[in-house]
Structure formats: C-alpha cells, structure tokens
Image (cartoon, grey):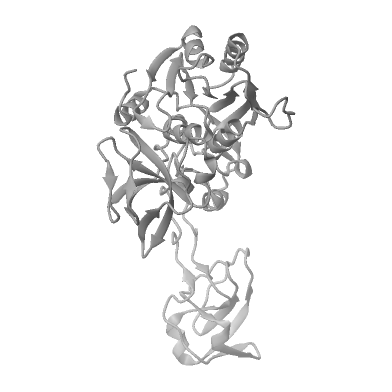
C-alpha cells in the first residue's frame, strides 16, 4: 500500500474546493458562536455627543477657579438637554447624560459641596475630566468586527449597540457521523455477548464537530453489512455536506467501507497516509459533498478527525484551519514507535509563558486509548524523519483546548 506523506495529505485538503459563501440571517441572540458572513461597520459615532462618564456637575473649566458655581438644575441620562451654560454656572449631570452646551468638564460629586443652589469646589479637576468625547468608542465608518469572526459575548454587545437586530452568519456545514462494526453497541443497547463493546466514536466526533461550528446528524451505528452500510451512506448523503464514518477502512475481511465509497460514485481524493495513528484514512468527494472514512479505534478516529475533518469544516465556514500548533519543549526523552509521522497524546504545561510537554500517566498501547486525551492534553507531532528525541528538544504540538 503506497502511503501519502502527512504534509502532502494536508496540502490536498487545503486544495479542496468547498462552498463557503452560503449564509443565513439569525436574530442577534441566536448568533452566539456563529461565524460572521459580513463586516460589521459602524454607521455613527459612539458617543454621538460629548457624554458624562460619571455623576457630577457639568461646567466650564475656566470657571472652577472662582470656587463657587450656581446650579441650574438636573440633567438626567436620556434627557434632551438644551440649556447652555453661562459664566459661573453648572448643571448636575449624571453618568451617560449628554453634556450641556458650553460645558467642557465634569467635576465629580465627591469633589464638591452643595448648599442653597450652589456648589463649592473642594478639589479641582483637569479640563475635559470625566467627559467622553464624540467617537471615543468608534467613529462612523469604522470596521468593528471583520467577516469570519466567531461571535462571542463582546461581539454580541457591540452589535447590540449598533442596533443589529438580525445578523448575517455563515451557514453551518451539516456533518453526519456513523460508527460501523458488528462488535459495537450504541448507547442503551444490551450486549448479546461479552465480545461486544460500547461505541464512543460517533458521540466523540459529534461533540468535536459541533464544537467546531458544524451542524451534526447523529447516525448511530451500523453492523458490518455491505447492503445496510450502503443504504445508510446513500440516505445520509442526501442531507449532509460531510459524511464521517469510523471503522471498515483497513484490510480485514469485514472492512467494507473502503469498497462501498467508490460504489457510491465518489472519487477518492486519497487513501492511506503515512501517519500513526490512522494510516488507513480515506477522503473522497461526490459532487460538492465529502466522505471521510476514519479508523475504528477511539483514539485513532479522534486524532484523524482533528487532522482532516476539522480543517474541512473550517474551510466551509470561511475560517483558518482552526488547529493551534505551538513549539513546546520536551521535559523527558521520547522514542518513536514507527517510521510514520506520529501524533502522541501529551500533557501540556505552561511555565513563564513557555510551553512544555511530558507524558506522565499517558498509557502506551494501541490506538484505542481515548482517555489519553483527557486532562489538558495536546498532540505532539513527531515527523517521519524523527527517531529518538531528547529532553529539551522543541517539538510541534497541537493544543486540544484551542481547536474551536
């Protein structure tokens, strides 16, 4: 079996053409976590007029030296203040209120004493104190949030301030997930014999893809039956953009998925990559849809989903790959177990702003040990040319808590 290099396989994923121009409009409150399909541009200044940033007395700074100012009345927030200050006059003005005409300074309540309609200046302030100038927050025409941004709480707040009732967001790709294998049991199913195992792949990957911004369709499990798998795949492809399966891609007698995919009319982009785990991965395309067949072991399917499905989801959302890769220093020696590019679960530690990794409590074994990805783990990348790596060596590491 001729294996593609990891770098070549990633380049082929990058070159895949996807439809990333689809969008929909949702209400502002429904847009959290979605990807913006347009730039958010301010249509006005914030604030529109000089505004008090504290409670106090709006005045002319040149009058403060007089020591006593006459109070003309109150100026509550939201009032359309029309009075104009004359010499030695002030107006009690509250946080968020429009500054009266003629006023250039707000002296805080704590700095004065009030009696009989006048204030006495106990402590002066600089000119312009506690006054928000026009456009302090942003100016008309400023691009405040760029297209492709994932909407968080701050974006929600800014758009609310701009009166964005409806928000244009990228349509989420629909990803179907199915686990194949006669030995696996879906949630709630009763075992018929002790050789059967509980399926976790379809739920692990569903959660991973949802977190990455996709809309998922949980297809459950399917036994090693060609006709049933074929029917499930055909039905799923009617409603998904990406169909992800686990199991059935190796070289065993019951590994049917690798044979079914071409029979569906899909063109195989590549099959077999020089990586560990997951070298039997298959990526295929049928029209504008994709089929990604992953290995069956839990750790293996999760790693390959991170490497190949998440970048494809990101492309459909108009985002970068989404994988955050950092240079981290080994805290212990590491020996590769294969001639392939290896992705090894590791502990990520940050000390004085530098990344370190170690393998404490990480079990060495098959590609089925999903628990190795718990507890602030990362994936250390060891290239094909790497062999024994000494402590202190810098290695590329994928941060698993920064995938989304």
* Above or below 388: residue 11: above
- Depth check, front residue: 307 or 254: 254
Q: How many marks?
A: 0
> Is residue 400 something one can see in this rendering?
yes
Q: On the rendered image, what quadrant is the N terminus found in?
A: top left
| Residue 388 location (% of width, % of height) | 28, 45
Going 48% across and 22% down the picture, which residue do you hit? 293
Residue 342: image quadrant is top left
Between 159 and 265, the residue placed more toward the observer is: 265
Q: On the image, which quarter does residue 339 sit in? A: top left
Eyeballing the image, is 51 above or below 38? below
Residue 316, percent from left and from top: 46, 29
Q: Position of residue 4 (x, y in %)?
A: 32, 24
Compared with 171, 236 (above or below) is: above
Along the line of sight, the residue nearer the viewer: 393 or 402: 393
Determine whether 1 is above or below 70 in the image: above
Residue 139 appears in view? no
How far across and down, in percent of the image, does residue 354 sit? 34, 59
Q: Is residue 44 left or right of residue 11?
A: right
- Residue for point 48% across, 57% down: 46
| Left or right position of 337 against 232 | left
């Amino acid at each position: 079996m001729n294996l593609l290099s990891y770098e070549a396989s990633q380049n082929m994923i990058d070159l895949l053409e996807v439809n990333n121009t689809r969008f929909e409009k949702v209400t502002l409150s429904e847009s959290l976590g979605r990807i913006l399909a347009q730039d958010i541009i301010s249509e006005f200044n914030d604030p529109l007029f000089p505004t008090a940033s504290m409670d106090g007395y709006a005045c002319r700074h040149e009058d403060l030296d007089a020591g006593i100012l006459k109070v003309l009345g109150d100026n509550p927030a939201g009032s359309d203040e029309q009075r104009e200050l004359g010499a030695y006059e002030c107006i009690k003005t509250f946080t968020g209120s429009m500054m009266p005409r003629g006023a250039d300074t707000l002296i805080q309540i704590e700095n004065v004493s009030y009696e009989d309609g006048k204030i006495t200046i106990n402590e002066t302030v600089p000119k312009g104190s506690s006054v928000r100038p026009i456009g302090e927050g942003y100016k008309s025409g400023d691009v405040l949030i760029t297209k492709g941004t994932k909407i968080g709480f701050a974006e929600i707040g800014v758009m609310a301030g701009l009166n964005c009732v409806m928000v244009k967001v990228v349509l989420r790709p629909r990803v179907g997930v199915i686990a194949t294998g006669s030995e696996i049991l879906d949630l709630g199913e009763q075992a018929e014999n002790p050789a059967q195992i509980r399926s976790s792949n379809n739920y692990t990957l569903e959660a991973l893809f949802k977190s990455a911004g996709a809309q998922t369709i949980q297809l459950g499990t399917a036994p090693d039956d060609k006709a049933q798998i074929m029917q499930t795949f055909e039905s799923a492809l009617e409603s998904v953009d990406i169909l992800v399966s686990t199991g059935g891609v190796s070289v065993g007698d019951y590994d049917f998925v690798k044979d079914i995919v071409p029979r569906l009319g899909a063109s195989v982009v590549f099959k077999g990559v020089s990586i560990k785990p997951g070298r039997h991965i298959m990526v295929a395309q049928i029209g504008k849809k994709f089929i990604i067949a992953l290995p069956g072991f839990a750790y293996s399917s999760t790693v390959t989903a991170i490497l190949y499905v998440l970048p494809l989801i990101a492309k459909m959302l108009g985002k970068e790959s989404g994988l955050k890769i950092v240079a981290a220093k080994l805290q212990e020696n590491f020996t590769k177990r294969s001639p392939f590019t290896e992705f090894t679960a590791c502990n990520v530690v940050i000390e004085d702003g530098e990344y370190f990794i170690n393998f404490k409590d990480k079990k060495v074994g098959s590609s089925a040990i999903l628990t190795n990805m718990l507890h602030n783990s990362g994936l250390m990348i060891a290239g094909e040319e790497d062999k024994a790596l000494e402590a202190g060596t810098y290695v590329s590491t994928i941060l698993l808590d920064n995938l989304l």
